Amino acid sequence: MATKGYKGKRNNITFPVSLAEVIEDIAEKENRAFSQAVVLLCIEAIKARGIEYDITDYLRNMRSKAATAD
């Protein structure tokens, strides 16, 4: 269930099996959902290219989602 107020865009992506396994490992080690790991990896890649991106809204959503899960 989406967190109220979060306005993310849903997409379907087919990953190569080996890449999906790496992302699953990262997600598990960081105690994240697969989709959260994908978002954070994308943000890191965008920043590595020198493109400014504000993740404040995304982080706020993740914090509120974690708080309601407790």
Image (cartoon, rainbow, N blue to C red):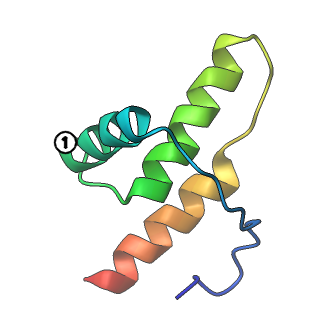
Above or below for 62 versus 26: below
Residue 49, x across and y down, in percent: 73, 11
Does residue 16 appear to the left or right of 42 in the view shown? Answer: left
Residue 7, x across and y down, in percent: 76, 72
Does residue 62 appear to the left or right of 68 in the view shown? Answer: right
Residue 43, x across and y down, in percent: 62, 33
Quick one: 6 or 32, which is closer to the camera?
32
Could you tell me which residue is drawn at 57 percent across and 67 percent down? 61
Above or below for 30 versus 11: above
Could you tell me which residue is drawn at 57 percent across and 61 percent down? 60
Could you tell me which residue is drawn at 44 percent across and 46 percent down? 37
Could you tell me which residue is drawn at 37 percent across and 60 percent down? 33
Residue 69, x across and y down, in percent: 31, 83
The part of the image, by quadrant, that contains residue 11 is bottom right
Quick one: 59 or 39, which is closer to the camera?
39
Check disc 1: other Cα within 10 Å, few if <14, some if 14-19, many if 20+. Answer: few
The part of the image, by quadrant, that contains residue 30 is top left
The part of the image, by quadrant, that contains residue 26 is top left
Above or below for 35 versus 25: below
Three-letter code for the amino acid on which mark 1 is drawn: Lys
Q: Check disc 1 and report its element: helix, strand or loop.
A: helix
Placement of the C terminus among the 4 image quadrants: bottom left
Q: Residue furthest front?
A: 17
**Residue under pointer 1:** 29
Does residue 70 appear to the left or right of 63 in the view shown? Answer: left
The number of discs equals: 1
